[in-house]
């Protein structure tokens, strides 16, 4: 190979190596997360550091970009058990109130379902009223044993032909 061809091949190889190296450096830079500075209160004074100690993990803190120095986030303190249950209750209440804005077809469907169940339960109670009355009498009778009261409950669901 002439000397100029060697130089050309060497230049191409060098160019490929440089491009491959810069791609690897760029990939490494992209893969590593941005460094952050964390600031939190400890015993009434503000403490900042590039690592968050375990005892400050549940504390309220501010996250600051180490590169720009600007605030990137705010993390609230961890909630206590009672605060978590109160928040869950408030969320459930908000969900129930949002049901008032449900489509009319959904609300009518629930209304019909509740009326149907209440009607069936009322009809069942009326059909068993004599036996339920006898059971309640047995339940309130102090002279009967627990076994006799349990037998009175079983009679409520016994078939009519028995």
Image (tube, rainbow, N blue to C red):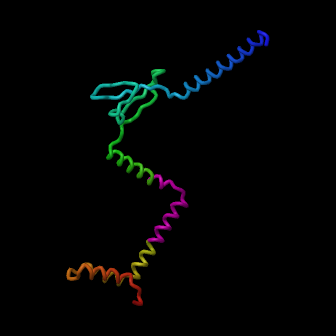
Q: Which quadrant holds residue 75? A: top left
The number of numbered discs placed on residues in the rendered structure image is: 0
Predominant SS along the magenta part: helix
- Magenta stretch: give its range: 97-117
Q: Position of residue 82 (x, y in %)?
A: 32, 47
Residue for point 42% across, 25% down? 37
* Frontmost residue, 150 versus 73: 150
Q: Position of residue 36 (x, y in %)?
A: 44, 26
* Frontmost residue, 111 versus 51: 51
* Frontmost residue, 146 versus 50: 50
Left or right of 33? Residue 56 is: left
Residue for point 35% across, 33% down? 54
Left or right of 109? Residue 143 is: left
Residue for point 46% across, 71% down? 117
Q: Position of residue 47 (x, y in %)?
A: 33, 25
Q: Position of residue 122 (x, y in %)?
A: 41, 76
Residue for point 42% across, 74% down? 121
* Frontmost residue, 154 versus 93: 154
């Amino acid at each position: 190979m002439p000397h100029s061809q060697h130089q050309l091949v060497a230049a191409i190889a060098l160019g490929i190596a440089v491009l491959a190296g810069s791609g690897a450096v760029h990939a490494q830079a992209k893969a590593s997360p941005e460094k952050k500075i964390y600031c939190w209160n400890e015993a009434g004074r503000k403490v900042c550091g590039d690592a968050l100690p375990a005892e400050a993990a549940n504390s309220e803190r501010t996250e600051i970009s180490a590169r720009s120095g600007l605030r990137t986030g705010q993390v609230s303190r961890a909630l206590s058990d009672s605060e978590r249950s109160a928040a869950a209750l408030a969320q459930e209440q908000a969900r129930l109130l949002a049901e008032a804005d449900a489509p009319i077809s959904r609300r009518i469907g629930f209304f019909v379902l509740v009326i149907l169940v209440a009607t069936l339960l009322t009809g069942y109670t009326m059909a068993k009223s004599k036996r339920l009355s006898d059971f309640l009498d047995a339940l309130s009778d102090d002279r009967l044993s627990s076994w006799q009261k349990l037998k009175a409950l079983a009679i409520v669901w016994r078939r009519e032909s028995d």
